[in-house]
Amino acid sequence: MVELDYMLRCMIKSPAMQMSASYYSSDELDRATHNEDLFQGEDIEVHLDHKHMGIGGDDSWTPCTHEQYLIPPNPYSFSIRLFPVTAGTSSHDIYKSQLDN
């Protein structure tokens, strides 16, 4: 496992959004069939999911997603700021970073 001397604080201006971060890439997760088959990378892959579409219909013979659960192809926007947080970062610095956006 990679040891870090800092953390990242993330501020997102957007409607509700799901965020995940992993040392395992999407390709690695698709490739592995068991947890012990996973190889941890040196990079962290971050995923931001703004919306999720419904998974399908009500039965196996009509797999279409209901109209009310479709995500329209509209432009969406958000902003993200990443801040390094070290052992020397004061709570005042973190508070001030919230005001500077």
Image (tube, grey):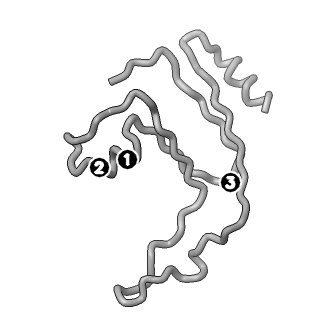
Along the polypeptide, which appears first: circle 2 or circle 3? 3
At label 3, the amino acid type is Pro
Along the polypeptide, which appears first: circle 3 or circle 1? 3
10 shown above or below 58: above
- Location of residue 1 in the rendering, given as x and y in whole percent from the top left corner: 32, 24
- Mark 1 nearby-residue class (10 Å; few <14, some 14–19, many ≥20): few
Q: Distance between the residues labelled 2 and 3?
A: 32 Å
Q: In this view, does 94 lie to the left or right of 38?
A: right
| Residue at the image point whose x is 37% and y is 90% from the top | 61
70 shown above or below 12: below
Q: Residue under circle 2? A: 31
- Location of residue 32 in the rendering, given as x and y in whole percent from the top left corner: 26, 47
Residue found at the very far bottom of the displayed protein: 61
At label 2, the amino acid type is Arg
Is mark 1 in CB contact (under 8 Å) with mark 2?
yes
Q: In this view, does 56 lie to the left or right of 28?
A: right
Q: Residue under circle 3? A: 15
Q: Residue under circle 1? A: 27
At label 1, the amino acid type is Asp
